[in-house]
Image: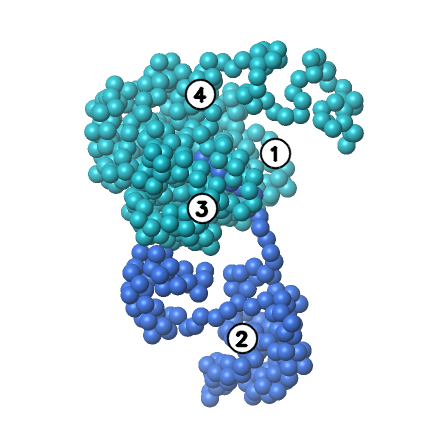
Chain colours: A cyan, B blue
Amino acid sequence: MSGNENGNETGNDDRPATDGGTAEGSPPTGEEEGGEESARFAPADRVESVPPSGIREFFEVAENRDDVISLGVGEPDFTAPWPARSAAIDSLERGRTSYTANRGMPALRRAISGRVTRYDQSYDPDSEVLVTTGASEAVDLAFRAFVNPGDTVALPTPTYVSYEPGVRFAGGEPLPVHTRHEDDWALTPEALREAGADEADVLVLCYPNNPTGATMDADEMDAVAAFCREHDLLVVADEIYAALTYEGDHQSVATRPGMRERTVVINGFSKAYAMTGLRLGYAMGPEAAIDAMTKVHQYAMLSAPTTAQHAALAAIERCDDEVERMRREYDRRRRYVVSRLRELGIEVSEPGGAFYAFPRVAELAPDGDARAFATELLEAEGVAAVPGTAFGAGGEGHIRISYATGLDDLKEAMARIERFLS
Amino acid sequence: MDEATRSLIDALVADARESTADLARQTGLDEAAVEERLGELEESGALRGYTAIVDWDATDEERVSAVVEVNVELDRETDYDDVARRIAESPAVDSLRLMSGDYDFAVNVSGSSMGDVSRFVSEEVAPLPAVTKTVTHYVMETFKERGVRFVDHDDDDRLSVTP
């Protein structure tokens, strides 16, 4: 440890020193006043055009109080199952620390290919599966591989926060398609038509949905598939929550007639196996699609983390019971949260999957403002929930409640919300 | 077993003190239906009891536990059930199981001293005609009991708000 407080000038470091003495200790935030140095790093227009994350300020308030119960966490509260962790450790002990094949270890791709047959999906492990650094990388790859500058990408709103920036980074134009509480947040051909998605090039689907918890039933998915065929849309289907489906079977758009050839399915290990920090996902699609995505992946990432790939293989092979145990527990919490909200007179559509409920607070907040409601709830009662607007304009009037939190905390949080409303 | 009944059992295993109202909320049943199903499960013997998990080390009570391995030799008049019935009678026995492997019964025993436990083994188990051998293992420390960990751990290192 050197005596230097900033720790960025050790004297022992024989790397060439930069002139100008920049980067004093803290990472660049992009929000500082532009001095000489930050002017040199003026973000590219694509980056500048993307607003900062809508949940960051909540995160800061919530982190700085110790009495906060957070219903704002978008990841499992469980730990990755032991067989998966053990396989990761084992791979390190055996010295498996090199790159894998660009597309991922063949054994893992075979396991993935076998696993998704439960959703009636069938992909050749050699040519139609790509292992990625989290499903997030797969989403980014899909946009970079298939979106041309100026292409229109239809995004149902509210939806997961990464799609819109991803589309912009790729040079595409996001087209919001409003889903509605009244439809239980399902996507309908009417909503697509109304938004002008018949003219779009790509459609992104995320069901079960973050932040609404919505799932699509077979008929609803058939109708969306028909729309995509009729208007020749490519589909990026983010099915990361597929394993956390509580009502009926998971419905994949890719299994509809004529859809496999126009769909990239994205899935991963983060949610089902509580492996968020291991960063492992995958994309599946026709050979040409996976080839294109692999081209970007091999230059940008080379291969997904090897240790995590070993964990993922064990997860598929040996953790079914553990996944089912977690799913059952989420399901009980889901029922509990929805019941309690409804008892409090708060409208909430039935969430069929993921681990979110998306109650309507418009009538409970000044001016129907979800952000104001969430801020007051956090300040008055120490309950953190994410305002729906963080997930796009379609989330106005709602908050996202994550039930990836133990039942005791959920009970306390609901009691606090009850007190807050009275 | 239907989905709701299974959820009901899961909820009770997680916390047997759940109120009927909270059980209803978690299972999607109404309160009357919860009561009715609990009655059925108790009636059928599926739900045998609701009991507390106590970390005696955290109290000022002395408590000594042991696992006793018991080997038995059966004859025409004596089967496993007979021996088990006899051993289970003692209030010192917390659990009793027939095992595969090197011994026949595993008996979890507790008392207020090692003397208590030893006396139970020497006076109530060893003298039974069918018993040929006992091995007593005293419990040194309990880390987890019926799914509940005794070591305080708060390892939620997740960020408090994430997308």
Q: Chain of mark 1?
A: A
For image coordinates 32% across by 38% down, the residue present is A362
Q: As drawn, is A154 to the left or to the right of A408?
A: left
Q: In this rendering, do the residues under marks 3 and 4 share a single chain? A: yes
Is A1 or A387 nearer to us in this picture?
A387
Dot 3 or dot 4: first in sequence order is 4
Q: Measure how far apart labels 3 and 2 are at the Cα level.
A: 35 Å
Q: Are marks 3 and 4 in contact (CB under 8 Å)?
A: no
Provide the residue designation for mark 1. Answer: A97
Q: Position of residue A103 (x, y in %)?
A: 47, 28
Q: CA distance from mark 3 to mark 1?
A: 32 Å
Give the labeled residue for mark 2.
B94
Q: Is there any visible trace of residue A269 in the rendered image? A: no
Q: Which residue is mark 3?
A: A404
Is mark 3 in CB contact (under 8 Å) with mark 2?
Answer: no
Q: Residues within 10 Å of mark 2 (few under 14, many from 20)?
A: some
Pointers 4 and 1 within a single chain? yes
Q: Chain of mark 4?
A: A
Question: Residue A33 versus residue A330: which sits nearer the camera?
Answer: A33
Q: Chain of mark 3?
A: A
Of the numbered discs 4 and 1, the one sitting upstream in the chain is: 4
CB-based contact (under 8 Å), mark 3 and mark 1 = no
Asked if badges 4 and 2 are on one and the same chain, I answer no
Indicate the quadrant where residue A175 lies: top left
Name the amino acid type tagged 3. Ala
Question: What amino acid is at disc 1?
Answer: Thr
Discs 3 and 1 carry the same chain letter: yes
Front disc: 4 or 2: 4
